[in-house]
Image: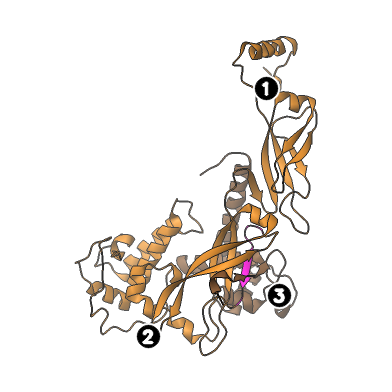
Chain colours: A orange, B brown
Amino acid sequence: MEFKDYYKLLGVERAATADDIKSAYRKLARKYHPDVSKEPGAEARFKEIGEAYEVLQDPEKRAAYDQLGNRWRAGQEFTPPPDWAAGFEFTPGGASAAEATDYSDFFSTLFGNFSRHSASTRAHGEDHHAKIFIALEDAFHGGTTTITLRSPQVNAQGQVVLRERSLNIHIPKGIREGQHIRLTRQGAPGANGMPAGDLYLEICFHPHSLYQVQGRDLSLSLPLAPWEAALGATVKAPTPTGVVEVKIPPGSQSGRKLRLKGRGIPGEPAGDLYLVLEVVLPRADTEQAQQIYHTMARDLAFNPRHSLGV
Amino acid sequence: MDMENEILTGSVIGDEGVLALEELARACGAEAQWIIELVAVGVLAPQGRETSDWRFRSADLTCARRVARLQRDFGATIEAAAVMIDLLDEIEQLRARLKQAGLDVD
């Protein structure tokens, strides 16, 4: 397990006041908060910051952490001293951003068995949340996916430890990004025989190589030869449920959208699939091809900049 | 029974209101009164007239949890968080339109 330097993570001195710590945390939160930040890796960074704040904003946890002294460096292999936290009594609950499942092994080892007591005072188990990434195809055909969750559980010694568990989950046909699957009684266990909480899974799609997703609709960029666009044609186009033939109206330009009704994500109503036409020019890399372009240049009297007035 | 091979089927929270007030509050780890305030400031718009008939959809769950995080992590009031939510939604829509236009900003 790696040692974490919580002071360094928040960029404050070891002598920092509670106000310094709060202000440093707020500044970093503004930068890395996953709800407002587009920085790459913001979410992982924010979890670290949240964990550091969780410890340093709490006088008891901070005092215990400080007891470890200056001997450790960030990233160094760490085992807690045998007398760790002797004489400390941690108050349950925390003020920070990190959810229990987000804490590092380092945090869980030091504070894990003190951090979740608030849950046990509530009758009903807490609801848990997780994001799952599924293939777009699963929304078309339904499917199953396996997720691994880390969740706090009470062990035989009465300590709360993070345990990994795998769940196989049925993905119903027609599910869309941003929707949730609710699994009852798969959240935190309830206290004193009360029911467990629920587990909410937020659906995200893996990016698809062909289709862009907007709600229930999909869009696909469909390349066309100039003569297909100009003269009209029947061409093949992929859809998530198989290849279809599409009529291209004569005189189509790049950017024109053709709607294939009901070919989007299934449902009541089903979404649509938009084909965004994209005219692709054949290369003029043979004499014959060049000849054809020369002929067009000579015979077509075409000024593509007419609308610019030049 | 081999738990590893069991396939769990959940219920879908989608565009139709299904979550009752207490259920949404619990999912957010919050009190029902806090949800009622979110409805009062217009952050959430449940189906149903009476509080006891309120039903919330998937977008409400996402939004309420977001407000909870913004309040917790920035000490924002509900009103300030509501403004942040509106702006964040607008940015998301603009980004989606840029992406559609082939102008990725990332």
Labels 1, 2: front one? 2
- Report the amino acid beneath label 3: Trp
Alpha carbon of mark 3 to alpha carbon of mark 1: how far? 56 Å
> B100 or B33: nearer the eye?
B100
Q: Residue beneath label 2, please?
A: A157
Residue A271 in picture, x, y percent from top left: 74, 52
State the extent of the magenta-drawn residues as a range. Answer: A176-184
Residues beneath discs 3 and 2 located on the same chain? no
Locate residue A29 relative to residue A87 in the image: left or right: right
Q: Compared to B95, does A106 lie above or below?
A: below
Q: Residue at x 45, y 58 (%)?
A: A43
Can residue A275 be seen in this snapshot?
Answer: yes
Which chain does the residue under circle 2 lie in?
Answer: A
**Counting residues from the N terminus, which is met first, the one under dot 1 or under dot 2?**
2
Of the two numbered discs 3 and 1 in the rendering, the one whose residue sits closer to the viewer: 3
Q: Position of residue A62 (x, y in %)?
A: 30, 74
In contact (CB < 8 Å): disc 3 and disc 1: no
Question: How far apart in space, not on screen, are marks 1 and 2 (Cα)?
Answer: 79 Å
Residue A57 visible here = no
User: Disc 3 marks which residue?
Assistant: B54
